[in-house]
Image: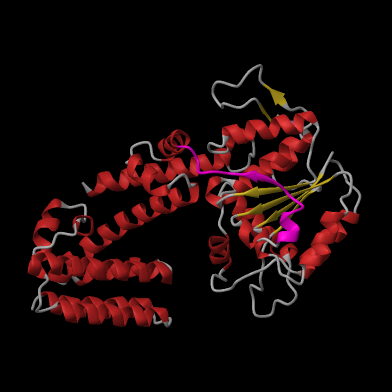
Amino acid sequence: MCKEKIKQKTQIFEKKTYLCKLFGRTMYFKDIVGQRVLINSLTRIIDSGRISHAQLFLGKNGYGSLALALAYAQYLNCENRVHYPDVDEQTQLRADSCGKCPSCIKYQQLVHSDLHFVFPNTAVKSTDKDVSSKDLMQEFRTYMLENNYYIRLEDFFEYLGVEKKQGAINVRDAAEINRILGLKTYEAKYKVMIIWMIEKLNTAAAPKLLKILEEPTDNTVFLLVSENQDKILPTIRSRMQNVQLRKIDEQSMRQYLHNILPDGNVENILQAAEGDIIEARNIISKTEQDHLFAELFVTWTRQLFKLQMLSLSAWVDKMHTMGREQQKQFLLYALDSFRACFLKTVAGINLGYQLDFGDEKFNNAFPRMISERNIEGIENVINKTIYAIERNAFSKIAFMDLSFSISKLLKQ
Ligand SMILES: [Zn+2]
């Protein structure tokens, strides 16, 4: 049973990695999930040559606004755009980039010298001074590529280790935009400046950017991306042409989910994700994490009854290799599980999902071990361990201590 689950999980993981490799570095329109009507109208406008020098892509990041801006820029500069006689049956597109011309190839690697990014930024190290997007460009590129351009600001900041900071597009960014505009266009038809999360524009930087937008240069295209137009300064907003993204349609979402989870229960995720790719990915990784935690929980508590030192210390070693955040998440999971067992034993309340440890025998037998005799003690020692982990305690000792305490409490 457990082995089967692990095998299944490994397959899912491999499939995900494979898909990342396959799609991670391309930015065709066809790689965007859904949004077909919008894309087809955009390519029609570009083909007609009526190109706005300042576009605002509006919509949640999980709908694909940044991905769309990038595919738009690639198509704009493609030297050999592909047009289908009607609409391509497979992709539902009327046109796309070629993916083979020198411009497309450089776009795919995000190394095109006429493609620029500006995004909210902040000091990462305490010694960092006067930072701008330029200082975090490497990290931003890597993060975009790893996540297929479906990214959120709070997740990017977590990746940088600065999740508690606000971040802004600042005056140094505006100065850098000015500098780049002064450079000659190296190799492209259009110089493209993508400004992600423009609602984070610092008020001090606004006048400078406004001036730039008011005096467009011939071959520069600004692609601004935003989740919330109400937070953009009205003076900036009024100079933009809007491209509104909506929820990804159900059929496209279902197809996407089937691709990454061939055997998974797609319907529940589909409903909960509400047309948002990032939401869907979060639900999937949460489910995978819960499977892992359930396995760890079962192994652990079984050892606590028998107090087999050898296997217990192997378990502690395994916990020790996890990051602190994941250690904490496991402890919270354990806390919820013990509480759910208590409610079942004492009040007959069945919290279904929280009581499914992926092992029928365990599911039936374990909850009975938790009662009013030990629940309070268990809660106390787990909370104490969470507190210790948060304060950088040596996790091997913390988990070993916790194991001894809970072992005693379980036998009460
Ligand atoms: Zn091309």
Instruction: Pick whichever, 149 or 246, lies toward us.
Output: 246
Compare residues 408 and 53 and report the one nearer the observer: 53
Residue 179 left/right relative to 287: right
* Location of residue 67 in the rendering, given as x and y in whole percent from the top left corner: 62, 45
- The C terminus is located in which quarter? bottom left
Residue 32 % position (x, y): 57, 38
Residue at position x 75%, y 60% in the image: 235
Q: Position of residue 207 (x, y in %)?
A: 81, 66
User: Which residue is painted at 70% across and 76% down in the image?
Assistant: 128
Q: Which residue is outermost to the top?
A: 85
Foreground of the two, 32 or 113:
32
Asked whether residue 168 is drawn in magenta, I would say no
Q: Is residue 306 visible?
A: no
Q: Does residue 214 appear anywhere in the picture?
A: yes
Of residue 326 and residue 353, the one placed in the foreground of this image is 353
**Numbered range of the magenta stretch:** 234-249
**Residue 37, picture quadrant:** top right
Residue 246 among those drawn in magenta:
yes
The part of the image, by quadrant, that contains residue 376 is bottom left
In the image, residue 390 lies at what x, y percent?
A: 41, 79
Task: Residue at 85%, 55% (x, y): give it.
Answer: 214
